Image (cartoon, rainbow, N blue to C red):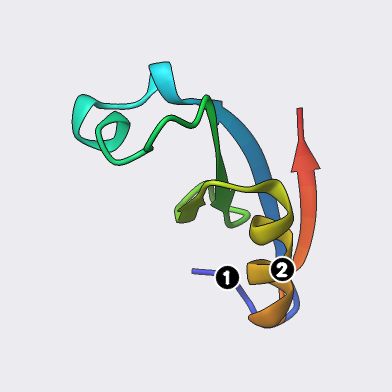
Amino acid sequence: MQTTEDRTVYIKSIPVTDLPSEVRAQAEGLELLYAVHDAEGQQLALVGDRKLAFTLARQHDYAPVMVH
């Protein structure tokens, strides 16, 4: 669990082809999705747009960082 001091989340692009079939079926033609992870690596969200991933993180008082 994150401490109140660590509000960093990490955003990583994920090729849809690397995801389980049930997730691929919901990707609706997208080639990339964006995963938002906390400092411990737990996935918090999976969204279809980079800008949305950053906006979502900021709306929940997290500091997003893109991971390559």
Q: Element under label 2?
A: helix
| Three-letter amino acid code of the residue under disc 2 | Thr
Residue positioned 52% across, 24% down in the render = 31
Residue positioned 63% across, 33% down in the render = 13
First-in-chain label (2 vs 1): 1
Q: Which residue is mark 1?
A: 2
Say few, some or many: other residues with alpha carbon within 10 Å of mark 2 (under 14 / 14 to 19 / 20 or more). some
> Which of these two is toward me, 64 or 52?
52
Say few, some or many: other residues with alpha carbon within 10 Å of mark 1 (under 14 / 14 to 19 / 20 or more). few
Location of residue 67 by image quarter = top right
Above or below, 4 against 62 in this view is below
Residue positioned 40% across, 16% down in the render = 17
Q: Element under label 1?
A: loop
Q: Is residue 65 left or right of residue 40?
A: right
| Three-letter amino acid code of the residue under disc 1 | Gln
Residue 50: x percent and y percent?
69, 47
Above or below, 7 against 25 in this view is below
Above or below, 22 against 6 in this view is above
Residue 15: x percent and y percent?
52, 22
> Which of these two is toward me, 39 or 62?
62
Q: Which residue is mark 2?
A: 55
Disc ID at residue 48 = none
Residue 44: x percent and y percent?
47, 59
> Which of these two is toward me, 56 or 25?
25
Distance from Cα at disc 2 to Cα at disc 1: 20 Å
Residue 41: x percent and y percent?
52, 46
Furthest toward the top, the residue is 17
Residue positioned 74% across, 74% down in the render = 58
Query: How many discs appear?
Result: 2
